[in-house]
Structure formats: C-alpha cells, structure tokens
Image (cartoon, rainbow, N blue to C red):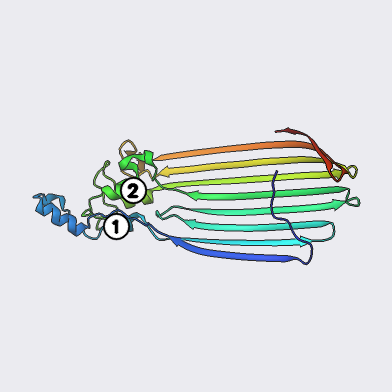
Amino acid sequence: MITTKKGTIGKPQFEYSTSMGFQKVSNPIDMMSSEQYAEQASLNGSPGLDHGSRGYDYEDAIFRTANTISHDLSASFSGDDSRTRMSFGYLDQEGIVKETGMQKYTFSLNNSLKAFNEKVLLETNVLTSHIADKAQLITGGAGFIGNLLGSALYCNPTYPIFNDDGSYFVKGTDYLNPVQLLNSYDDNANTTRILASISPTVHITDKIDYKFVFGVDYSTSDRASQLAADFPLNDVSGGTTADGSPAGGLAFLFDVERFNKTFENILTYRNDFSENFSLNALLGYSYS
C-alpha cells in the first residue's frame, strides 16, 4: 500500500522549491609534493627516483568540488468529490571523484474520488523513479593497482601525466597512470521503479466497509561497464588486431527485472453499542 500527501479542497495550488549545495573531500591524506619527493629521493641517495616532472597532486588528479542541485514541483487540484496531487522531482548530484555522480527523477500521483453518493471511495497512487548512476573503480575489492584511489596515492609524483605529444605517460602494466585510468573506465547503471496501487472502498452499511487493494511493484535495472581496449593493464591489454586496432579491454553488461503484484481484501465492522462499549473488527486476506 502506498501513502502520499493528498490534495486539499479549494483552488489549484502549485509549489516549487529548489536547493543547491556542494561537497568536497574533508580530510585528504597529506602526501609529498613532487618537489618534496625529489628532494627526499636525493637525500636518501636515490636520485634515480626523480623522473623530472613537477606539479602532480593526487587530489587535483581525481577529486573535485562536487555540485548538487535539486528541483521539486507539485500541483494539487480538488473538488467536492475528487482530490488530486502530482509532484515532480529532479536531483543532479556530482560525486567528489571525477566522472562519478547520480541523476534522479521522481513522479508521484495521488487521487481520491467519491462516487454514488459517497458510497464508493476510489483511491489511486502512483510513485515512479529513475536513477542514472555513474561510478568509478573505487571499490575495496579492486586492489591497490586497479583501484583509482590507490593508483593516485601510489603514483610517483615526479612522473608526468602526459607525454610531450599529448598521449598518456605509461610506466608499465602494473604501475598505472591514475588520470588515464579515470578516463579509460566507464560504469553506468540505470534503475527504474514503479509503485502503484488502486483501492476501491465500498460502504456497504453505516457499520460495514469492504476495501479491495491491488498493488504492483515493478523495477528494472541495467548496468554497463567497460575498460578501454588500449589501457595498459596486466591480463587486459592484448596487443593489436589484424588492422592495428588495440586488442584487449573489458566489458560487462548486467540487467535485472522484477515484477510483484499484491491483492488485499479487507472487511471492517464498527459499532458503538453504548458510551462505554464499542467494537471494531477486521477480516482480511492478502496475496502476493
């Protein structure tokens, strides 16, 4: 059963609200700058660890100040025998890791209608949502090499991100360029869900009511992720094809769909026998 706000009797009412915000990393890990790293390598007698590049900052490489904005619009219409309320919502939330974020769309409808001299009450409720989610390789099971955060922290800050010709600097298949990893991986998921119910109530007598509820819960979700074919990673990169194109990469597709139905029958009896004694009885049956 779905319960939402209901319209009020009177003139049509419209409401709109919006909000904005931002978020960023609150407690970043303090790491050496490229200058400090080069100086420490020289002091330790390992000048070969300094590869000459300056300016790398792991925070700038993968993090950002993420913006969030939301919009909500609702409308209510009502009359003597009918009330309707609709609402629309939109949320756009960037992730603090670059190339991550979520967009969410929602719609709800609530209607109640009285008929046959108020002997019948028909209630309809619909709630839908769609979420588009964009993720990156930041899960705990990716390992320090395949994990974007681990690669950014592990990266020698004196390595360049790009070569002079604009291509990505590649040290090897077990030492990843975090910016290249960020831009070579795509992970997009879409989830849609619909909750709906219709419930007529019949006032059989002043003391007896019968209510029938039919509800559905439908959801579908799909996810597509891929790692570029030219990304240099152990067990992923595989040379070239016959026409010279990169051979390798990874791609995954997932989808799931669920559909549940619910049927309810409710019979209620109410009677005030006296000021000190009243009876409320309910008989119900539910199937899903």
Q: Are marks 1 and 2 in contact (CB under 8 Å)?
A: no
Q: Which mark is residue 149?
A: 2
Tell me which corner region of the image, top left, top right, bottom left or bottom right, holds residue 256.
top right
Dot 2: element? helix
Q: Which residue is mark 1?
A: 166
Regarding residue 37, the answer to whether it shows in the image is: yes
Q: For residue 240, say whether it is visible.
A: no
User: At x 75% / y 65%, what residue is drawn?
Assistant: 12
Residue 193 against residue 13 in the figure, above or below:
above
Q: Position of residue 278 (x, y in %)?
A: 83, 41
- Residue at 69% x, 66% y: name it: 14
Instruction: Tell whether 129 sits left or right of 144.
Output: right
Q: Amino acid at mark 2?
A: Leu
How far separated are the C-alphas under marks 1 and 2? 23 Å
Reading the chain from its start, which is encountered first: label 1 or label 2?
Answer: 2
The residue shown at (60%, 46%) is: 192
- At label 1, the amino acid type is Gly
Residue at the left extreme of this rendering: 45
Neighbours of disc 1 within 10 Å: few (<14), some (14-19), many (20+):
few
Is 276 situated left or right of 30 in this image? right
Relative to 240, 84 lies left or right: right
Q: Residue at x 35, y 54 (%)?
A: 62
Question: Residue 250, position in %: x, y?
Answer: 40, 39
Which residue appears farthest toward the front when viewing the image?
Answer: 276
The residue carrying pointer 2 sits among few (fewer than 14), some (14 to 19) or many (20 or more) residues within 10 Å by Cα, namely many
Q: Is residue 286 left or right of residue 248?
A: right
Residue 196 to residue 19: above or below? above
Quadrant assignment for the C terminus: top right
In the picture, the disc for residue 282 is none
